């Protein structure tokens, strides 16, 4: 089998699995709310337990990837994700489901970063942006599956049966990734002190803090919405039934997938015409903020806006390859996980905070629709500020 496929396909399967799990709660939210009787803030906390565990492990994950290599680290962690899925299927209380959700977040925390690390070891720097986008396209397929197809499956099989199937899929993905070839020198016996010094170098660099605020608020905000709040927003603000809301989620995932494929195959031709990945990132985030504004204002028709929202989000992930270019290949794991930490800190805080603000505004007398609109508008203001910071540092 072609080396590219031997490396790419198993890691793509892992990221597909990861992205499906990231978004599954958005579709099963009505069932969880009905069965557990939780508030919006509780639902946000339950779902964001994934993001909290995911983000908390990013810095040690970077050290592990650079020290032990991608295939060993991801295969081990995917087994934890499979166990988390099994526990989620059996959970009967908010606390049990939150613990299971946290185990899932921990278990899939390396799926994207391990892919980036493996690509940095096997392929040249000139191919990183395209390869990164290709692996994210696999995540886009996971997002698509966790929309209308999942909304169809839940009434047929129940959400618990879905999580049993996910536990089996996670174990299979772990075996596939562990079976990928090793590259000589892919794991480094670098002293821990030296590894930590490299991490400090990244976290204190001006390059890192140019990218971090935008990734935290815009990319993290997208993940928070896609992973939970998009469907409640569409149901409570736009008044759509769940099937129609899930269809919007499908459109958003379709846009994201097309965007990733476009980046995977279009970066090199565009660069030859003078359109650099940096310019794509800047323009994509600006267009995404405009689409968000129109969504917040309730512009119609909404379907194209959600498609564009997903399409331009794909550009946000160019930040990983762009930031990695400021450092040596030996730091690739730490660079990518440091930025990913910021993304998932943002996603966690936004996913939890969105529900808390909605609840607080409703308690203060806001109608449900107005509470959702005011919360989303506040998030958009923060995102716009981070984009302007990124442009100012150009």
Image (cartoon, helix red, strand yellow):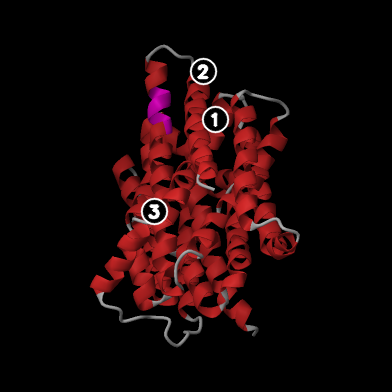
Q: Earlier in the sequence, mark 2 or mark 3?
A: 3
Residue 355 in magenta stretch: yes
On the image, the x and y values in percent for residue 345 come to: 38, 46
Numbered disc 3: secondary structure: helix
Numbered disc 2: secondary structure: helix
Q: Residue at x 50, y 84 (%)?
A: 181
On the image, the x and y values in percent for residue 150 come to: 59, 48
Numbered tag placed on residue 32 in the rendering? none
Numbered tag placed on residue 233 in the rendering? 1
Q: Which residues are magenta?
A: 354-359
Q: Residues within 10 Å of mark 2 (few under 14, many from 20)?
A: some
Label 2: which residue? 370
Q: Earlier in the sequence, mark 1 or mark 2?
A: 1
Q: Residue at x 55, y 54 (%)?
A: 317
Q: Earlier in the sequence, mark 3 or mark 1?
A: 1
Q: Residues within 10 Å of mark 3 (few under 14, many from 20)?
A: many
Label 3: which residue? 341
Between disc 3 and disc 1, the foreground one is 3
Q: Nearer the viewer, residue 181 or 93?
A: 181
- The span from disc 1 to disc 2 (Cα, nearest Å) is 11 Å
Q: Is residue 31 above or below residue 280?
A: above
- The span from disc 2 to disc 3 (Cα, nearest Å) is 32 Å
Residue 215 seen: yes
Residue 361 in magenta stretch: no
């Amino acid at each position: 089998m072609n080396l590219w496929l031997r490396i790419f396909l198993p890691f793509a399967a892992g990221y597909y699995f990861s992205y499906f799990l990231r978004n599954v709660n958005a579709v099963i939210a009505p069932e969880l709310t009905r069965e557990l009787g939780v508030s919006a803030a509780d639902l946000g906390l339950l779902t964001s337990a994934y993001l909290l565990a995911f983000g908390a492990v990013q810095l040690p994950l970077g050290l592990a990837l650079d020290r032990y290599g991608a295939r060993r680290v991801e295969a081990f962690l995917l087994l934890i994700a499979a166990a988390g899925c099994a526990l989620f299927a059996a959970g009967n209380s908010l606390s049990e489901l939150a613990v299971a959700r946290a185990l899932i977040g921990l278990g899939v925390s390396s799926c994207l970063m391990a892919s980036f690390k493996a690509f940095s070891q096997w392929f040249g720097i000139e191919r990183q942006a395209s390869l990164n986008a290709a692996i994210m396209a696999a995540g886009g397929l996971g997002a698509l599956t966790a929309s209308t197809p999942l909304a169809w499956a839940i009434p047929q099989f129940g959400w618990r049966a879905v999580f049993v199937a996910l536990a089996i899929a996670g174990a299979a993905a772990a075996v596939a990734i562990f079976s990928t070839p090793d590259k000589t020198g892919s794991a480094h016996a670098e002293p821990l002190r030296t590894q930590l010094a490299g991490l400090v170098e990244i976290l204190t660099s001006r390059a890192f803090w140019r990218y971090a605020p935008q990734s935290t608020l815009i990319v993290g905000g997208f993940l928070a919405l896609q992973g939970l709040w998009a469907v409640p927003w569409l149901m409570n603000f736009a008044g759509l039934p769940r099937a129609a809301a899930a269809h919007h989620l499908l459109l958003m995932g379709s846009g994201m997938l097309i965007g990733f494929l476009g980046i995977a195959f279009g970066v090199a031709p565009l660069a030859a015409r003078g359109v650099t990945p940096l310019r794509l990132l800047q323009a994509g985030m600006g267009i995404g903020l405009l689409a968000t504004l129109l969504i917040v204002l309730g512009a119609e028709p909404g379907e194209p806006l959600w498609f564009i929202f997903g399409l331009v989000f794909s550009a946000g992930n160019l930040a990983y390859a762009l930031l990695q270019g400021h450092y040596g290949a030996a730091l690739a794991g730490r660079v990518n996980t440091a930025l990913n930490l910021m993304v998932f800190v943002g996603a966690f805080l936004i996913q939890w905070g969105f529900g808390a603000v909605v609840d607080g505004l409703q308690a203060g007398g806001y109608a449900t629709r107005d509470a959702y609109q005011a919360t989303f508008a506040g998030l958009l203001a923060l995102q716009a500020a981070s984009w302007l910071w990124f442009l100012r540092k150009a």
